[in-house]
Image: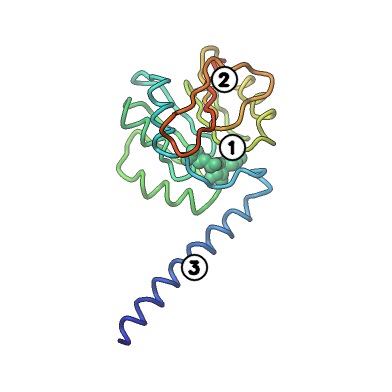
Amino acid sequence: MHSLIYTILVITGVFFGLKLAYVLCTAVVLPATRGALYVSTSRVRISAFVDAVPMKAGQLLVDVGCGDGRVLRQVGRRYGVRALGYELNLLAYLKAKILCLGCRNIEIKWRNFWTADLSDADVVFCYLFPDVMADLGAKLKSDLKAGAVVVSCNFPIPGFSAKRVLRPGNSLHNDPIYVYHF
Ligand SMILES: C[S@@+](CC[C@H](N)C(=O)[O-])C[C@H]1O[C@@H](n2cnc3c(N)ncnc32)[C@H](O)[C@@H]1O
């Protein structure tokens, strides 16, 4: 009986500890992420983007705000391309590092992507927040090479017209995924 109570207390403690870590890690970086919380894109939605944007060996995918790195892993597995993720949230960064252990084509940086040079990227993936999309458009326009593809989950980039808008039918949320050719 005692060991059962002990086990329940430990599980509850770990659960609340993780929740607290999420809240703290998110709150600390909120001024820098400007509202983009650590929320993951579903596998169905990533698959829709991966199907719609084929990549070739040697190309580079960058996820600006990569969360647990799931986009990098799914694209890396499908096309064998190089994948680089920037992530400021410490909890998400550590999870991404652990989940990407052994993936030699994936790199995760605990760094603010606004100060990074994205000029090597062939495809940029983002799932951020409406408030930052106009600034993001300006940064991508100044950084990216001609022909680079930008994929934005949920939120359009003001001033740019999307080449395609995906709405994966079998996903839980039917929010759009915008595909831009720069
Ligand atoms: C909505 S989540 C998306 C995660 C992942 N891309 C996905 O689709 O599953 C947005 C992530 O971007 C990160 N982020 C926001 N602004 C950032 C910045 N300036 N530099 C690095 N990471 C940032 C947040 O911490 C958060 O984890």
Please tell me which of labels 2 and 1 falls first in the chain. Answer: 1
The secondary element bearing badge 2 is classed as loop
Q: Is residue 179 above or below residue 132?
A: above
The secondary element bearing badge 1 is classed as loop
* Quadrant in the picture for residue 108: top left
**Distance from the alpha carbon under mark 3 to that under mark 1:** 26 Å
Q: Position of residue 6 (x, y in %)?
A: 36, 81
**Distance from the alpha carbon under mark 2 to that under mark 1:** 18 Å
**Distance from the alpha carbon under mark 2 to that under mark 3:** 42 Å
Q: Which residue type does callout 2 highlight?
A: Leu
Q: Is residue 70 above or below residue 15?
A: above
Left/right placement of residue 17 relative to residue 116 reads left
* Quadrant in the picture for residue 2: bottom left
> Foreground residue, 134 or 9?
9
Q: Which residue is mark 2?
A: 144
The numbered mark at residue 128 is: 1
